Every structure is written in C-alpha cells, then in structure tokens.
Amino acid sequence: PELSRPGGPAGPGGTLTSFRDGIETLIDGLVRELAGAVECDRSLTGLAPVDGAPGSWRVETREHEALVADAVVLAQPAARSAPVLAALDPQLAAPLEQIPSASLAVVALAWDAAAIGGAPQGFGFLAPHGEGLRILGCLWDSSIFPGRAPEGKVLVRAMIGGALDPGAALLPEAELLAQVRGDLRRAMGIAVEPEHAWVFRHPLGISQYTVGHLDRLACLERGLAQWPGLHLTGQSYRGVAMNACIEDAGEIAGRILAQLPA
C-alpha cells in the first residue's frame, strides 16, 4: 500500500510505502528466504575474539551454545550494545554509554468513520511544543496506507514522550489514553470514544544526537579499527529514520563482504 504526493506542509514528498501487516513482514520474509541460516530468539550476553583466528568471533548467548562468526554486527540501540562490549573493551563501550535515548509511546486509536465525520484526508500532523498539546504528532494511518483499517473505519497513531517529555511515555495506560484522546479532541475535534485502542511503549525509542555526537562516532570508528570483524549500526549512529539505517547497513554489508576470505 502506498500514497504518492508532492512534498509540502501536509507531509513528506515521494511515495510512502509500508507492509500491510507491519514491518515484521520484512523480517519474517528474510527468515523464510534464508531458511537454516537465521536463528531467532537468542539473547546476546558476550563477545570474544577467537584465539589464533583474527577477525573471527565467539558469540555467547543465554539460550544455546556459543556461535563462531566471521563477522559480528550489533544492529541495536547503543544502550544495548554498551554492556556487551564493556567486558571486551571499556574504551569502546564508553562512547556508546554517552548516546542517550528518548522514550516514546505510540497510541493507536480506531473509530467508525461516520462517527467522526468521515476519514481525515492527508498525512497527519506534528504538534509544536508551544501549541498546548502533549502529543508529538499524529499519523492518519488508514488514510496514508489503504488496507490498514477495514472499509468504513479509521485508524490513527499518536506519538507521545520524547526528549522534552520522557515521563509521558511512562504514564499508566488509562492516563496515557486520556491524555492522547484529550489532545486529539483539541486538535481534530474528535470527542467520540474510540472503538479500539492500543498502547505500544518504546523505552529506547529515539536516539538523541546531542552535542559531541560526531566526536563520539569518530571515537567509535577508532575503537572498532582495533577489532576486525566487529561492526555497529542502527539508529543510534548516523540517522534515526529507517532509510538512514538501511543505507548504513548496506555500507557495512559491503565492507564485510570485502573482508571475508574469497
């Protein structure tokens, strides 16, 4: 499902694309295509270079016996990678510990379109901090992506929390729903109770590129140079958007392929 439009105040330009059943569709597809080569549901507990095999790594997990790998990519938030690397190289872990994250909650609400005066047309909106709304913004999912809601129904997603209001993402569910519904009543005039509501919390939601971030990245690059075969990627480093993460992952994949034995 996709929606094309020129860029402008109403939203980004280009083509907005997603999977009908969510981003997990991509991961499930990769697991199927790489049958036998992907092992899921393992918890990483430690890394160590293999003696006598430069560039090879021993990967410790909580559930099963250790793995031996030609390369290791930690594609997770910096806060998750830091404790794993602390035992290996405290100086490498130090800049990871200095990359903060802002917690985020996503509240999805569904209505009958007729009950709210029809489906909203457009992308949604961002809420500037001075507008008196606590939510960060709202995406009109069922208008952006056809098929996200049954015919005659409306689905929206509101984001709340972030660096300036981290406590919002931790509110009790009833209080969180009341806050979001109140903001949408003021912003969109929707006073009708939703037919369904869902809350998704992301404690490490959005990495924050605070002053000194480029210096931290340079420090990480110097540290990683001491450990061939070890790589870091994800939204903690060179862009929080999925497009930026994919671009960075492609570069790292190319680097790994170039380093592997022929």
Image: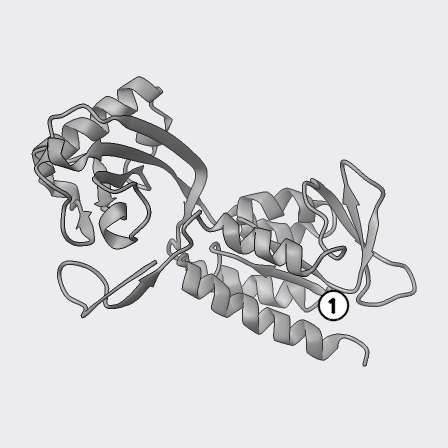
* Picture coordinates of residue 208, whole percent (x, y): 39, 50
Q: Is residue 132 visible?
A: no
Residue that carries the numbered disc 1 in the rendered image? 228
Is residue 101 positioned above or below 180 on the image? below
Dot 1: within a 10 Å radius of its alpha carbon, few (fewer than 14), some, or many (20 or more) residues? Answer: some
* Left or right, residue 14 beside residue 125: right
Task: Using the image as rendered, state which of residue 173 and residue 122 is in the foreground.
Answer: 122
Residue 121 placement, left or right of 207: left
The number of numbered discs placed on residues in the rendered structure image is 1
| Residue 12 vertical placement versus 138 (above, below) | below
Task: Please indicate whether residue 181 sits to the left or right of residue 245 in the image.
Answer: left
Element under disc 1: loop
Quadrant of image for the N terminus: bottom left
Image location of residue 132, percent across then percent down: 11, 35
Q: Residue at x 77, y 36 (%)?
A: 63
Which residue is drawn at the image coordinates 7% and 34% (left, top)?
189
User: Which percent across, then down, holds residue 207?
Assistant: 43, 49
Which of these two is toward me, 164 or 106?
106
Q: Quadrant of residue 4?
A: bottom left
Residue 143: % across, % down = 22, 50
Q: Please indicate, yes or no, whether residue 36 appears anywhere in the rendered image.
A: yes
- Three-letter amino acid code of the residue under disc 1: Pro
**Displayed quadrant of residue 169:** top left
Q: Is residue 117 left or right of residue 146?
A: left
